[in-house]
Amino acid sequence: MVTAILATALSLVDPMIGTEGTGSEYGGMTPMTGVPFGSMHVIPVTRTNAVGRTWFNALDKELLGFVLSRQPAIWMGEFGAVPIWLEKPLPIKSVDAHPWRTVVKAGGRTYELAALSHAAVIRSDDPTLGVALADAGSTSARTCRVSMRPIPNFRCHWAKRTAACADGRREVAVGVSLIRPENAAAAAEGAAERGLDGCADAAHAEWERFFSRVDVAAPDRVKRIFYTGLYHALLYPRKLSERGGEYYSAVDDKVHVGPGYSCFSLWDTYRSEHPLLTLIAPDYAGEMCQSLVDMYKWGGWLPIWPNPGYTGVMIGDPAAIVLSEAYVKGVKGFDAEAAFAACLKNADVPQPDDAQRTWLDVGKDEPGCPETRGGLTWYLSHGYVAYDQTVESVSRTLDYSLADASIAKFAAALGRTDEARRFAARAKNYTNLWCAAEKCFLPKTSDGKWGDPSTSTWENHPYTETNERSARWCVPHDVDGLVALMGGPDEFERELDKFFENDFYKTDTVGNSSVHGNETCHHVAYLYNRIGRYDKTCRRVHDILTRCYSDSRRGFDGNEDCGAMSSWYILSVLGIYPLDPASGEYELGSPLVDRARIDIAGRRLVITVRRSRPGSWRTVRVSFNGRELANRRIAHADLAAGGEVVFEQE
């Protein structure tokens, strides 16, 4: 039984971390119970769902019911949720949450929750539990942050099975399907046969299968944040595949056979979530890449934020970065030629009406496909996205340059020499917006005039969740080029120091209590490595790890964003970070673990930290299998081959 399992890494997970805050500027998490990459999870409900608002917040005092939810992040809405309302709100006494099982006590009643990928079971002494939910039905409800384009065939079917327990309690099993009622009924029946304990045991085994791949020795606080972060990272993206391998694809409103993942927050997750998965779940990373390729096949374009289909949220071409990174790192299980063709189309073909659109956020800019490189016409003709033509023009230019650099590496790995050269040249387009006088990237109009960011409005803002001070660091693919633009290593270091001392720990452009609360600057601390100031990388990384993350219910600065915040913590605690994911390399920093073990596709990687005294954090030497890594970088291929990385700190 699950209740008899001894303390393990999994038992250190606290799903309540990141669930308490006002507004939307906190962890933005809910205590999700289910399985890794589940198509849905079951959650206690304390408030109604909306964009910028989750079903549960630890500040709330009353339990309203439970929900089979697919909401991936606080700033992205729900699709096809099935709520199970209580007869009346009940005052909450306690919530004991675990990934595989949650117990809620409220109003003198006890509710136990467990779930598999397509079904949830609730057991309670409440005789009215589930009575308000019909035995079968369907919903097409969506609260997604999208333009709500019609997808006529979208529908979540549910089926309910109720059974009495010997002790007078009752179990309510609810199965769901995005394809057909029969699938929902089969899921409900399977969960009912297992019962709550059986579902909890099966879910625990699934979590343990992933958690057994990683083990760390570290202070208790670090382990709680680390393993809770691992739980967060393994929730996303959601695998929608059902019986027979079928899945519903919202990009073309049809049913297909394949891995069928959704809920990719790619603009957030290409930076560290997907790099983390290439290490701890390469067997799943390939499926996820194939799912992105299939979206291109069915919908015509690579996605940016599919939930469940194109949404028009965020910018750039992050899918190209994820696909390029996976191929460069040797991830198997996806059609690389089709992936490269998809990258080429997104990079080379503007939407037919691209030049007539301003590309406002959230797909409000009808008609046409909402998910593509908005402003690509100007990027191709001018070498930058024009400020007077397209919103978020500076951030788009920087993001497209990074994506082009990634495609160049993909092309080189495929042996496509001409394409590699072409995209490597395009990756320098970021230089076209560099203003030497201001030492930052500024917007530029289609006739080459500089724009003034201070006068911008929502209708023509040039940056995406950043500003001119932090955007100037967003060139992780060409740090040497950025150093040259700034006037050399000494000036680069001075400006980087000023950024951390004056800007980093101030409230950022979207209300987070540090710049780290937003993904645009997740790589910045590691830039010091590229000018040989390894001590400053260690100092800044250590500060962020200890100041921006906690094991409290608030959790960390900024929304989790589908594992983006937690994966940064996990990698940095281990002492590695992918400054440029598609490079196939990691920067080395300041690990907080004493020792770590990661099993990567049958090979074992060990990370050992030797400290001159307790609390040391400045790395003075790193070696891999006895070979010193003087430039503080290591290749993914080396890590994946197994061996030992030794950090010496003082």
Image (spheres, rainbow, N blue to C red):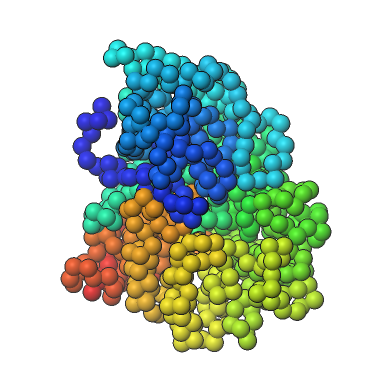
The relative height of residue 136 versus residue 602 in the rendered view (above or below) is above
Q: Residue at x 49, y 39 (%)?
A: 47
Q: Position of residue 363 (x, y in %)?
A: 70, 50
The quadrant where residue 77 appears: top right
Measuring 34% from the left and 57% from the top, which residue is drawn there?
Answer: 550
Can residue 572 be seen in this snapshot?
no
Q: Is residue 77 visible?
A: yes
Q: Position of residue 35 (x, y in %)?
A: 41, 35
At 71% from the left and 57% from the top, the residue drawn is 360
Q: Nearer the viewer, residue 297 or 269?
A: 269
Residue 147 location (% of width, % of height)? 70, 45
75 versus 183 height, above or below: below
Q: Which quadrant does the C terminus fall into? A: bottom left
Q: Quadrant of residue 392?
A: bottom right
Q: Position of residue 34 (x, y in %)?
A: 41, 34
Residue at 43% of width from left, 70% of height from top? Answer: 505
Furthest-left residue in this view = 613
Quadrant of the image occupied by residue 79: top right
Labels in figure, total: 0
Is residue 311 found left or right of 628 in the rendered image? Answer: right
Q: Nearer the viewer, residue 106 or 74?
A: 106
Q: Quadrant of the N terminus?
A: top left
Q: Is residue 145 above or below residue 441?
A: above
